[in-house]
Image (spheres, grey):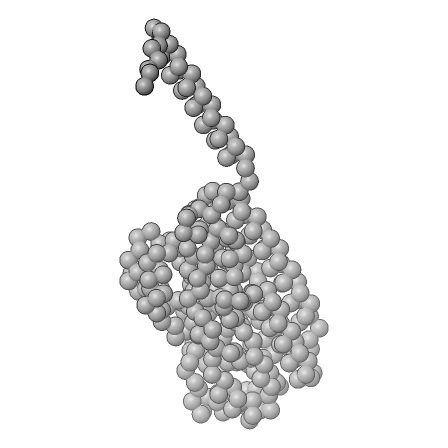
Amino acid sequence: MRWHREAPGEGLCWISRRLVLLLLTALVMFGCGRASSPVAAPREKGGLQVVVSIGPLGYFAQRVGGDRVQVHVLMGPGTSPHDFEPTPAQMRLLQQADILVLNGVGLEFWADKVVASADNPDLEVVTTSEGLDILQAPDGQGGNPHVWLDPINAIWQVARIREAFVRLDPAGEEIYNTNSARLVEDLKALDRDIMLTLAALSQREVVSLHAAWAYFSRRYQLKEVAVIEERPGEEPTPAELARLVQQAREMGVRVIVVEPQMSAKAAEVIAAEAGMQLVSLDPIGIPPEYDYLRTMRANAQALADALRAAGP
């Protein structure tokens, strides 16, 4: 092998030229990186790992996060939030998650215990109802958690989710802002559509199986005259059933709102005694193929049809 003998100072000049080339290459690559459009997902494992409690929050999180997040909904089909318990597999999921998105107002009564058990110091917990005007629960014990059933409240919850994503993944801020702005416009359109669907109703009184629809009723000027189960899952006594039947007859209420996640036995008894009609509205949907906008429009239409059929 032959070695080239450098003239005095030639080696230093060669090194200097190479350093300049390396610096120029780095600057060009850096400049191109900054000029390119939104970067890919923040982690090799597929983006932020987002765990949410219920389907509506999962829908909001996926719409805001897009391809930069992986969303996991804890409460699956047929699950009632009021008696939920996480499985061992879900606990393992929380141990590796970046963020846990909650509704709050006591809906996730299990949250503190579960977060402590997960032992994930990097887990960020976001309670999306913080800052909203909370209605009181029917039994007077705490607040009513069903805030997402008012699309205007949902807009607030979307903002909380967007803020959390930006904190954890600043590189995706442009994407999160764009996606959330689109979702907010969709929620405003949903609100207008529900207003129109329910606007001309003469019969606006309902009895509810439980107080899921209080925020919806307040927003759209319906009157929830009674709640069958003041505490979800606790059926009324025979005396309470008789009082509800009498109340419905006196006020001329003809529609009872039930839900697919809860037993309707007590509602069926009242409907049979008072000559009322049952209508099933879905407050949390069926993940994973759950669409908040479509579900809420279907709920509004089903309720309008039932109230119209009940007559003046």
Residue beneath the point at 41% across and 73% down: 82
Residue 239 image point, x, y percent: 45, 91
Quadrant where the C terminus is found in the figure:
bottom right
Residue 288 image point, x, y percent: 50, 66
Residue 226 left/right relative to 11: right
Residue beneath the point at 34% across and 6% down: 8
Q: What is the quadrant of residue 221 in the picture?
A: bottom right
Q: Residue furthest front?
A: 1
Using the image as rendered, state which of residue 68 and residue 137 is in the foreground.
Answer: 68
Using the image as rendered, state which of residue 266 and residue 59 is in the foreground.
Answer: 59
Residue 79 image point, x, y percent: 44, 74
Q: Is residue 68 above or below residue 232?
A: above
Q: Is residue 92 above or below residue 238?
A: above
Residue 198 left/right relative to 27: right
Residue beneath the point at 39% across and 14% down: 14
Using the image as rendered, state which of residue 260 and residue 229 is in the foreground.
Answer: 260
Is residue 91 in sight in this rendering? Answer: yes
Residue beneath the point at 43% across and 57% down: 50
Q: Is residue 137 above or below residue 65?
A: below
Residue 177 left/right relative to 92: right
